[in-house]
Amino acid sequence: MVKPYPYYISLGEANDLCKNSLISLPSETIPIEQSLNRILSSEVKARVNDPSFDNSSMDGFAVIYENTLNPPTKLTIVGTSNAGSHDFKQISDGEAVRIMTGAPIPKGADSILPIEACSVEGETVTLSEPSKPHFIRRLGENFAENETIFSQGDIMTPERISLSAAAGVAEVTVYCKLRIAIISTGDELKSLTEELEYGQIYESNSYGLSALVQLYGHEAIRFPSVVDDVDTLRAVLNKASAEYDCIITSGGVSMGDRDFVRILMEQEGEIKFWRVKMRPGSPPIFGTWNNTPIFGLPGNPVSSHVVFRAIVAKWLTAITNSKDIHNKYTFAILDEDIKTQDDFTTFRRVQLFQKSGKTYARLKGHQGSGNIAGIAMSDGLTFIEPEAKGRQGDICRIILL
């Protein structure tokens, strides 16, 4: 039977189809102290030069470089320049000004000698070595007034928040957060407040998926788990689509008679694709429910995490034209053969280690997609392209966890 939608497609094709179904996000302006992990919707320009004046990077003495080339050199101390000082000093040949870190450079001075390279007696300082012109921080050497310091799509980190403050920027304009409903499905799922009976497990996927959504700068709303019932699931999806920007489900997307997410999407939703050539995580669905984007992720916890990183994260970053700073890569030499499948992208949990100055990767724990401990305790995931074989000794790209 030919499916009325793309079926069992490559990971690249899946990502392309997702990018053809992006949604628009409005913007808001917020104080920088509230901007951690937010995504800029417009560029940020510096309001001032940094530094805004020439200043010293050391405690010591501001001097004229030519006066210090034949140490030991004796100079007359003619004043002090403190940080925040408005009393501008000036020196001439044979003179020095005591200076503190961050203090303005006196007029006429062009270098600094650290205090530990000097000895002071009364109003005379003796320099034991030549002074250092590079110990002066020059006006605007870090950034200039009106210079663009961040671009649209940049993600606000603690360092960028600090830089914004240094640039005199009190507010930034960012994309509003997507409000994403997280819905786990399955009769066997129980909440953490309940005692387990035989055949039951604690529902965990919504916690991990919510954390991933927040990691990417958006808001996650966890729904109570939904039993395997078409009418109940339909009602929950209707509520989620009416109130939220996107839906992520876990479970119910495979080929069984009780995979109700897939059944409902086939009967009443719009499927953009179903099944992707990737291991683990091959049965995801992407489409819309009542015009709301929906990602149907596998119920096995490792598969749900891998599909989020490989597909959902790419969609989220495409919406805001931002870099995926949370899927960082390194490269390692495979210490053993990795089981692959022709035409599939292979993600396996690995541990990284050093040997003879090189980085190697070996499998970590058993690779069953239900083994969440395996991914939680691993250093990374292999990213083995469909045409690669994953043989011992191959250089492999590793997604760091």
Image: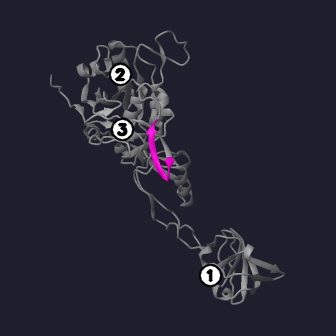
Q: Residue at position x 25%, y 28% from top?
A: 271
Q: Amino acid at mark 1?
A: Asp
Q: Residue at position x 32%, y 35% from top?
A: 340
Q: Earlier in the sequence, mark 3 or mark 1?
A: 1
| Mark-to-mark CA distance, 2 and 1 | 69 Å
Outermost residue on the bottom side: it is 93
Q: Nearer the viewer, mark 2 or mark 3?
A: 3
Q: Residue 240 appears in which quarter of the rendering?
A: top left
Q: Position of residue 305 (x, y in %)?
A: 42, 32
Taking the image as shown, residue 247 lies to the left or right of residue 357, namely left
- Image position of 235 with respect to 53: above or below: above
Q: Nearer the viewer, mark 2 or mark 1?
A: 1
Element under label 3? helix
Q: Position of residue 5 (x, y in %)?
A: 20, 29
Q: Position of residue 74 (x, y in %)?
A: 76, 87
Taking the image as shown, residue 56 lies to the left or right of residue 281, namely right
Residue topped by disc 3: 310
Q: Residue at position x 51%, y 18% from top?
A: 191
- Image position of 139 with respect to 77: above or below: above
Taking the image as shown, residue 400 lies to the left or right of residue 283, namely right
Q: Position of residue 239 (x, y in %)?
A: 38, 22
| Mark-to-mark CA distance, 2 and 3 | 24 Å
Q: Quadrant of the N terminus?
A: top left
Residue topped by disc 1: 110
- Image position of 175 with respect to 183: above or below: below
Q: Nearer the viewer, mark 3 or mark 1?
A: 3
| Mark-to-mark CA distance, 3 and 1 | 54 Å
- Image position of 39 with respect to 96: above or below: above
Outermost residue on the right side: it is 122
Element under label 1? loop
Residue topped by disc 2: 237
Q: Amino acid at mark 2?
A: Leu
